[in-house]
Amino acid sequence: MVKINQLDENLNIEGKRVLLRVDFNVPINDGAITEDSRIERILPTIKSLINKKAKIIIIAHLGRPKGKIVPELTLKPIAKKLSNYLNQDVVFLNESIGSLAIQNSKKIPNGKIMLLENIRFYKEEELNSVSFAKELSKMGDIYINEAFPCSHRAHTSVCEITKHINSYAGKQLLEEVKVIKMLTDNATKPITCIIGGSKISTKSGVLINLIKKMQNIVIVGAMANTFIKHQGYNIGQSIFEKKQENLIENIIQEFKKNNCNLLLPEDVITSKNYNSKGVLKSLDQINDDDLILDIGEKTIQSISKVIDESKTILWNGPVGYFEVDEFSLGSKKVANKISENTKTKSLVSIAGGGDTVAAINKFKCSSGFTYLSTAGGAFLELLEGKVLPGIKALEIN
Ligand code: 3PG
Ligand code: MG
């Protein structure tokens, strides 16, 4: 059993500089944060450090500036949000390394916070650079990784840094890992996974791992279109992935070999474009100019039945184009059904991925889920059974 280094709750960190890596990669539109669950989720960790009177230096990234200063990707709006949440000033520093940053880290009063500018403005961040890690580590006495959503990246402030400073896993990160491991290692059966997304090629690894562990897998969203086309139906103008015939055949074989049920849409809602009315169609009624944008009533019923038969549910990927109300009924019904059964039938329900969580929030079902992961890529890679570099870096050898 590998052990992850955890911070002893009783360790006195008063006056110590805690370098806290978080994931504040939240959607920002015109300087306004449109969804902030990643920030909210980290608040208990920050508050606990405030209570312990540590000097808190936060490292985070936003978007993919690729080593360049991109003004729209500044973390300034996040400093403001954080300061509102915590009811205290959050000092924002334009530079994330160098003598000024080190000096400032020492000047932070106990229990106060300094947020460093987007760490991805430095090209060294994505290079897992030794010299950059050494520089960063000079700003702290200890380091805590509370950034589960980017722990699948071998980046400096997630990986290499742990070699140069006493490093620990944050509580939120450990919780994410625990829930995902439970799903693949000892969840109560029958387990059902509802999986969507656009590309089968990027999700085949996770699918093949889950087929071995779960009793039912429901494939929805654009990923299902590739399967529907493979079944010989016309999918019109719908999004699908070309040249995946062999992969699909392999996946279908895996389902058979492992006695796992595969559920695909039986009927769909189509439209001529994203703004027109939706029409309910059976799979053999789809026209050349149709777009599949949601699942139909029959499919909703089949999915509801499987949810009723399940003890554990994993959901990643909305079932339709839920952003537009006309095509949101499938996702809404699925979110409601899972949430209802979690409340009344002790179903264990876990969802992850930005779009899925956004859909669950849109339908006001978040309180009905056992656990919502804040991660997308990291969530899927851990489900796939991969070793995440950021977690590996925190192991006790
Ligand atoms: C995410 O939002 O998935 C994480 O913050 C990682 O970001 P990235 O996919 O740009 O590396
Ligand atoms: Mg990502």
Image (spheres, rainbow, N blue to C red):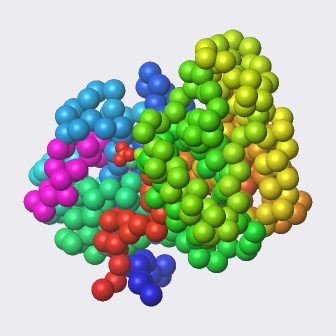
In the image, is residue 279 above or below residue 68? above
Q: Residue 83 vs residue 349: left or right?
A: left
The residue at 66%/18% (across/down) is 287
Residue 15: x and y in percent read 34, 68
In the image, is residue 142 above or below residue 106? below
Q: Is residue 167 magenta?
A: no
- Nearest the viewer among 172 and 290 is 290
Residue 307: x and y in percent read 80, 56
Which region of the structure is painted magenta?
112-132
Q: Residue 176 sits in which quadrant?
A: bottom right
- Nearest the viewer among 130 and 12 is 130
Looking at the image, the residue that sits furthest to the right is 344
Q: Residue 224 vs residue 201: left or right?
A: right
Q: Is residue 125 magenta?
A: yes
In the image, is residue 376 above or below residue 285? below
Identify the image quadrant of the C terminus: bottom left
Residue 120: x and y in percent read 26, 43
Identify the image quadrant of the N terminus: bottom left
Q: Residue 295 sits in which quadrant?
A: top right
Q: Is residue 381 visible?
A: yes
The residue at 57%/40% (across/down) is 230
The residue at 26%/46% (across/down) is 119
Residue 100: x and y in percent read 15, 48
Q: Is residue 22 visible?
A: no
